[in-house]
Amino acid sequence: MELNQFFKSIIDQDRCAVVICNLDHEIIYMNPAATARYARRGGAKLTGRSLLDCHNEKSGEIIKKVIAWFAESTDHNIIFTSHNKKENKDVYMVALRDENGALIGYYEKHEYRNKETDELYHF
């Protein structure tokens, strides 16, 4: 079995939205949580479109600055971008690199701070 199938499954099972972009800011993949979260904006139809079209001009400039920062060093891989008080989550941008460390894209990572409410090992 190809390793990429395992990585895709990890992303697809994540309850948080994952939107992966290439360096042209083209949305190349959205996990099921992302397609549901952004359904009002087009959901899965956003794949192939520019992420910059989904943001205002100021946010677009910030995204471009983050990508430039990622490109400066292989040590620049994650940056805190915001806290959403309403949803009690922190949001980060994360660099994606190839096996040689070259920057190939990025994604947005959401980390919720809410305590889990499921029972342990709830079958």
Image (tube, rainbow, N blue to C red):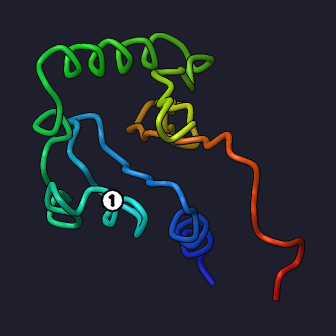
Q: Residue at x 21, y 14 (%)?
A: 61
- Toward which corner of the image does residue 40 lie, by quadrant? bottom left
Q: Position of residue 69 (x, y in %)?
A: 43, 12
- From the viewer's side, name the closer residue of 43 and 70: 43
Left or right for 13, reference 59: right
Left or right for 32, reference 47: right
Left or right for 60, reference 90: left
SS category of the residue bearing label 1? strand
Q: Position of residue 99 (x, y in %)?
A: 58, 43
The amino acid marked with disc number 1 is: Tyr
Q: Residue at x 55, y 62 (%)?
A: 15
Q: Residue at x 50, y 41 (%)?
A: 87
Query: Quarter of the image containing the C terminus?
Result: bottom right
Q: What residue is disc 1 on?
A: 29
Query: Quarter of the image containing the N terminus?
Result: bottom right
Q: Position of residue 97 (x, y in %)?
A: 51, 37
- Toward which corner of the image does residue 7 lie, by quadrant? bottom right
Q: Is residue 112 above or below residue 68?
A: below
